[in-house]
Image: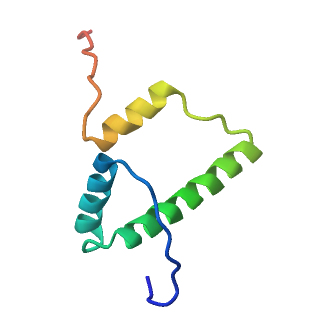
Amino acid sequence: MRPGRTKTTSFSLDEATLKNLKALAARRHKGNVSALLAEVASREAKFAAAEAFFEKYGVPPLDDEAIERIEAEWRGETAKRRRRRAA
């Protein structure tokens, strides 16, 4: 973010959320919470555009099972494979 090209605002957050935001900002933006929030806002705008695209072309939303499979993959978990009997 460039100085002078920003506006100041405020948010009311619970203590745990603020602590988590500061920790994320420390890891990803050298402690700059504003930069982290700008990144999150940009990402959310892209998600909103994707949702509009899917809705326009009739792509159904993911169900809870699909979301869980994706999140498990992000966590590095692998699906348990079924054993096949030898023929």
Relative to 56, residue 5 above or below: below
- Give how far across and how far down residue 66 sits, in percent: 47, 30
Q: Choose top left, top right, bottom left or bottom right for residue 3.
A: bottom left
Closer-to-camera residue (12/43): 12
Q: Which residue does the image show at 27% across and 22% down from the upper left?
A: 81
Q: Choose top left, top right, bottom left or bottom right for residue 28.
A: bottom left
**51 displayed left or right of 64:** right
Q: Which residue does the image show at 70% across and 50% down from the upper left?
A: 52
- Give how far across and how far down residue 62 sits, in percent: 55, 33
Relative to 6, residue 80 above or below: above
Q: Choose top left, top right, bottom left or bottom right for residue 55.
A: top right
**Image quarter hosting the C terminus:** top left
User: Furthest residue to the right?
Assistant: 56
- Give how far across and how far down residue 79 sits, in percent: 29, 27
Q: Which residue does the image show at 57% across and 60% down from the upper left?
A: 46
- Give how far across and how far down residue 74 sits, in percent: 32, 43
Closer-to-camera residue (54/18): 18
